Amino acid sequence: MADFYPYLVSSLPTLHLGMKPPFSFEGFLGMCREFIPAHDYIVLCNLPEPARYQEDRSRQETVRRWIEFDTTLRNELVKVRSQRVHREPSSSLRPGASPDPTLTAAATAALANPSLLAAEMSLDEVRWKALDELAAGHHFDLVLLITYALKLLILIRWEPIHNADPGSILEHTLQKARG
């Protein structure tokens, strides 16, 4: 179908950080395929993973802005970690980022957290808020779907952690420690 954004967006459940993903990313793409133009569908299918940010040449502004934001956040994490181990961060920094004091503070706070899961959740909260800002003013268009897709990917990344059985993880760890 050509352009049924209002119908598609209205049918999507609201996403909240920490919730179980309502469907897989492939399921989301399947829903989108029926209701949006092919060129917009291709943008959603080609959202880059962080490892591919440098090679992404997206002409879509929201994707470019997201890559710049997430690269900046990752660079701030590199800087804070480098300070802790007294190393020069420049060899690990990725191009395409702009300094942002807010993200410096978020990275510092996250890495100061003794709980790795809580630290990672705080970083995803920062990402979630950035996606909310990118989506501001967009209701039935590609920008909203891009930010929705990126939020869905955050939820999907957390799903194995939320579904993990702590008892079996402990047992597995103890068995490995015993040799």
Image (tube, grey):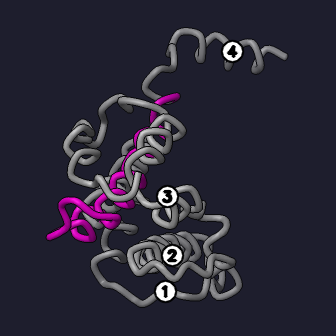
Q: Residue at x 49, y 74 (%)?
A: 67
Q: Give whichever of discs 4 and 1 has the lower sequence position.
A: 1
Q: Residue at x 14, y 70 (%)?
A: 137
Task: Check disc 1 and report its element: helix, strand or loop.
Answer: loop
Say whether marks 2 and 3 touch (CB < 8 Å). Answer: no
Say whether marks 2 and 1 touch (CB < 8 Å). Answer: yes
Which residue position holds label 3? 41
Q: Residue at x 22, y 59 (%)?
A: 140
Which residue position holds label 4? 172
Within-10-Å neighbours for mark 3: few <14, some 14–19, many 20+? some
Q: Give whichever of discs 2 and 3 has the lower sequence position.
A: 3
Q: Position of residue 159 (x, y in %)?
A: 46, 31
Which residue position holds label 1? 97
- How far apart marks 4 and 1 lie (CA) works out to 40 Å
| Residue 71: mark | 2
Q: Give whichever of discs 2 and 1 has the lower sequence position.
A: 2
Within-10-Å neighbours for mark 4: few <14, some 14–19, many 20+? few
Q: Is residue 7 left or right of residue 111?
A: left
Task: Check disc 4 and report its element: helix, strand or loop.
Answer: helix
Q: Give whichever of discs 1 and 3 has the lower sequence position.
A: 3
